[in-house]
Amino acid sequence: MAKKNVFVSFDYEHDRHYKSLLNAWDQNPIFDFGFSDRSVTKPINSEDEVRIKAGITAKMNKATYCLVIIGKETHTSDWVNWEIENAHKLGLKIVAVKQDALYTSPDSILGKNASWAKSFKQESIINALESASQKKT
């Protein structure tokens, strides 16, 4: 499978271990999973919202997809909501995966033609990325 350029949007406070799992899948040659992570990997050393948004946008501009990991608290994250809106504005294909089907989706994902992974499993996420690649933004 060819690597996809993916920006991962997630609630850092609560869900960073899921982001780590994606990276582990990418590194493990046994899994047929590959993505080029275009996410912010180091905190942007600023409290200036404009500067932080510019740094995130620079990363997003190198991506084709925005994968939104939805955990229990994600819908309350102003940053995740902004990243979804920005990804849509930039023309990224949006893919979403809930850690649990009962978790609330961020309002900003509504109407964005997102592709959904049915579960946080490698095959489901791969299928959602492939489905998104067929959609027009």
Image (cartoon, rainbow, N blue to C red):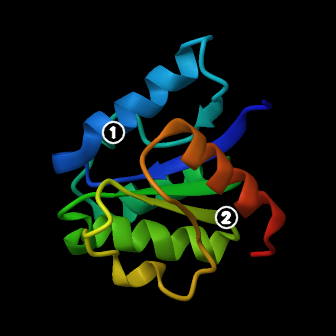
Which residue position holds label 2? 92
Q: x, y percentage for residue 82? A: 40, 72
Left or right: 13 in relation to 112: left
Residue visible at 63% across and 56% down?
A: 128
Q: Is 65 in front, or is 125? A: 125
Q: Classify the position of the N terminus by image quarter.
A: top right
Residue 18 numbered mark, or none: 1
Q: Is 124 in front, or is 105? A: 124
Residue 55 numbered mark, or none: none
Residue visible at 47% across and 41% down?
A: 121
* Amino acid type, mark 1: Tyr
Direction top: furthest residue: 29
Q: x, y percentage for residue 100? A: 29, 58
Q: Classify the position of the C terminus by image quarter.
A: bottom right
Q: Few, some or many C-alpha atoms within 10 Å of disc 2 (few <14, some 14-19, many ≥20)?
A: many
Residue visible at 27% across and 34% down?
A: 17
Q: x, y percentage for residue 64? A: 71, 54
